[in-house]
């Protein structure tokens, strides 16, 4: 840390010393505790899916417009703010 310009000549504040001591003690005692409670699933069927629906949907056009409109709006707002009036 001294390479990065941190000056330790005045020492470390009492609150920082207490924090670092508590942090070191917490890290040192991690090994005394076992792993957290783990409950395995007994019945689970993994189904692979891409998340894409390959079917006709009645509101598909509205959904696409709902995604495209904000993007176009942001793009045009950016162009408008860059112009000098």
Image (spheres, grey):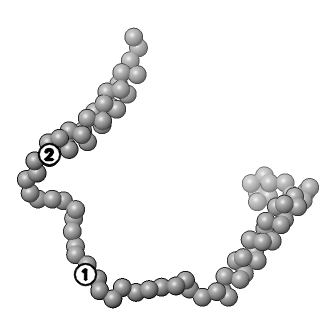
Give percent across and percent down for residue 65: 20, 38
Residue 60 is left or right of residue 85, and the answer is left
Between 47 and 28, the one lying in front of the other is 47
The residue carrying mark 1 is 45
Residue 80 is left or right of residue 29, and the answer is left
Lower position in the chain sequence, tag 1 or tag 2: 1
Q: Secondary structure at mark 1?
A: loop
Give percent across and percent down for residue 80: 36, 21
Position of the N terminus, as image quadrant, is bottom right
Q: Residues within 10 Å of mark 1 (few under 14, many from 20)?
A: few
Give percent across and percent down for residue 70: 30, 36
> To which quarter of the image does residue 83 belong?
top left
Residue 15 is left or right of residue 79, and the answer is right
Between 80 and 18, the one lying in front of the other is 18
The residue carrying mark 2 is 59
> To which quarter of the image does residue 62 belong?
top left
Q: Residues within 10 Å of mark 2 (few under 14, many from 20)?
A: few
Give percent across and percent down for residue 79: 35, 25
| Residue positioned most to the top | 85
Q: Is residue 12 visible?
A: no
> To which quarter of the image does residue 59 belong?
top left
Position of the C terminus, as image quadrant, is top left
């Amino acid at each position: 840390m001294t390479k990065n310009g941190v000056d330790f000549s005045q020492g470390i504040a009492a609150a920082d010393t207490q924090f670092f001591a508590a942090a070191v003690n917490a890290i040192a005692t991690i090994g005394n505790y076992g792993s957290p409670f783990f409950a395995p699933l007994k019945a689970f069927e993994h189904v692979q899916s891409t998340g894409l629906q390959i079917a006709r949907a009645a509101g598909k056009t509205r959904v696409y417009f709902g995604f495209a409109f904000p993007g176009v709006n942001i793009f045009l707002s950016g162009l408008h703010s860059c112009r000098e009036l």
